Image (tube, rainbow, N blue to C red):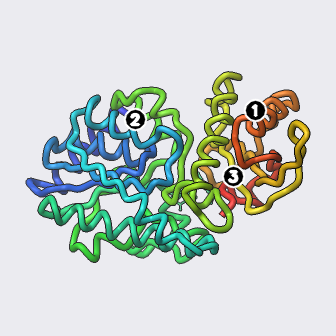
Amino acid sequence: DWTMAEFRATKIAEIRKQVGSGRVICGLSGGVDSAVAAVLIHEAIGDQLTCVFVDHGLMRMGEADQVVGLFREHYGIPLVHVNAETLFLNGLKGVTDPEAKRKFIGKTFIEVFEAEANKIGGADFLAQGTLYPDVIESVSFTGGPSVTIKSHHNVGGLPERMNMKLVEPLRELFKDEVRALGRELGLPDIFVGRHPFPGPGLAIRIPGEVTKERCDILRKADAVYLDEIRRAGLYDAIWQAFAVLLPVRTVGVMGDGRTYDSVCALRAVTSTDGMTADIYPFDAAFLSRVATRIVNEVQGINRVTYDYTSKPPGTIEWE
Ligand code: XMP
């Protein structure tokens, strides 16, 4: 007879017992998982928790402001917001290999986080919103299965370096359960219902080199796509939908001129845990509306395609 209310109460007791009077630091990624973990832990131990949001500049449009607003204004949870966009973009110059991007972002994320943690006097515990699928898809420093599908940067690394113990209250949960817990904790629906977003952010949705200019182009295309999905009332029926900016230019025609610009791919999948996925079968009219808007509204894109690959054999992200 297992309910989210019981889970909440049990976890709060466990967190209090584990942490005692220690100090906890929690990295917010902008996603649902770390937000739910932070709110749960805050409920358990109040101001013994400090949140740090390392803003790598690879977020979607308006996302960083939403996170800061939610935590500072809505919950009054102490939050350090670090704008590290330049650091990340400089380090990504010339990097095209997907795993190299992930490793650089993960490593830099940890360095920035560590520096901030030291500034506020350190902590005894590190809180993470690690979910069950993260545990089984990554090599875990606690000795999980040794299969690396993609290195998820929120698992491993920092705690050993900083001599911190881990607090991971969501480790047994799947995504739908985390959402139920988020609702139970009173997180706003638009936040709880948000599509998952990967730690490395837009960097893994820009095959090839990541630049500020390409991030800006992708942010615009992605915002148009999601706007149309919301207008059509489809947001909640989809597990994840996003645009990918391809490192390919093709010829087009606009007015009386020839264009030679980037291709944008649209991805939308249904899933229950992200481990397998099916493509979302949009109707043709919807897709052509999105394609027309993106080409008209986003300078730098002149062609739009739809990704029809399920997982497996594809992955949800392109990198
Ligand atoms: P894939 O692309 O492996 O993605 O089918 C499965 C789910 O995981 C998310 N994802 C990540 N999340 N760090 C994260 O925190 C990562 O490096 C990462 N890579 C993929 C992806 O968005 C999808 O929900």
Q: Could you tell me how far apart the alpha carbons at marks 3 and 1 are, in whole angstroms?
A: 16 Å
Question: For mark 3, does the 10 Å Cα neighbourhood hold few (<14), some (14 to 19), or many (20 or more) residues?
Answer: many
Ligand 1 is found in the corner quadrant, namely bottom right
- Asked if labels 3 and 2 touch by Cβ distance under 8 angstroms, the answer is no
Name the kind of residue labelled 2 in the image. Answer: Gly
Residue 163 lies, with reference to residue 120, above or below; the image says below
Left or right: 131 with respect to 316?
Answer: left
Q: Compare residues 135 and 72 and report the one nearer the observer.
A: 72
Residue 182 badge: 2
Question: For mark 2, does the 10 Å Cα neighbourhood hold few (<14), some (14 to 19), or many (20 or more) residues?
Answer: many
Q: Secondary structure at mark 1?
A: helix
Displayed quadrant of residue 287:
top right
- The C terminus appears in which quarter of the rendering? bottom right
Question: For mark 1, does the 10 Å Cα neighbourhood hold few (<14), some (14 to 19), or many (20 or more) residues?
Answer: some
- Tell me the residue that label 1 is attached to: 293
Point out the frontmost of discs 2 and 3: 3
Name the kind of residue labelled 3 in the image. Answer: Val
Name the kind of residue labelled 1 in the image. Answer: Arg
- Tell me the residue that label 3 is attached to: 244
